[in-house]
Amino acid sequence: MIRPFVGRHIWPLVAGGVTLALIAAAVIWLRHDAAEDVRNEIEEQNNEAGDAGDAAARDRRECVRSGGVWRFESGECARSR
C-alpha cells in the first residue's frame, strides 16, 4: 500500500530537484562569467595605466637627455635656451 503512494509521488520531487539543480548551475555559471568579465576589464585598465606610465617616463628621459627640463605640473618638456 505504501509503495504505490511513494512511487507515484516521488517523480515530481525528482523532477523538481533536477530543475532546481539546473537553475542553480545556470546562476553559478552566469555569476562566474560576469566576474570573469569584470576581472578582464580591470586587467585591461591596469595595462593601459602601465602603458601610460611607461610612455610618460620615456618622454621625461628623452626630455632630460636632450637638455630640456621636465615640468611635472604640465607633464611637458621645457627646452632650455
Image: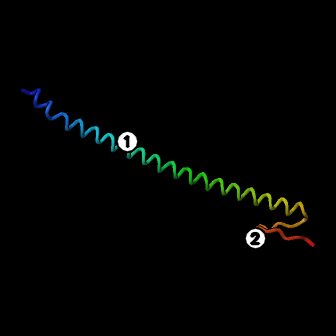
For residue 55, side relative to residue 1 (left or right)? right
Q: Mark 2 points at which residue?
A: 74
Task: In the rendered view, tell whether residue 66 sits above or below residue 30.
Answer: below
Alpha carbons under labels 1 and 2: distance apart: 53 Å
Give the crowd class for mark 1: few <14, some 14-19, many >=20 residues within 10 Å. Answer: few
- Mark 2 secondary-structure assignment: loop
Task: In the rendered view, tell whether residue 66 sits above or below residue 3.
Answer: below
Kind of residue at disc 2: Ser
Which marked residue is nearer to the observer: mark 1 or mark 2?
Answer: 1
Residue nearer the viewer, 50 or 14: 14
Which numbered dot is residue 47?
A: none
Q: In which quarter of the image is residue 56?
A: bottom right
Which numbered dot is residue 25?
A: 1
The structure residue drawn at horizontal position 65% and vertical position 53%, both measured from the top left corner, is: 47
Quadrant where the N terminus is found in the figure: top left
Kind of residue at disc 1: Ala
For residue 74, side relative to residue 3 (left or right)? right
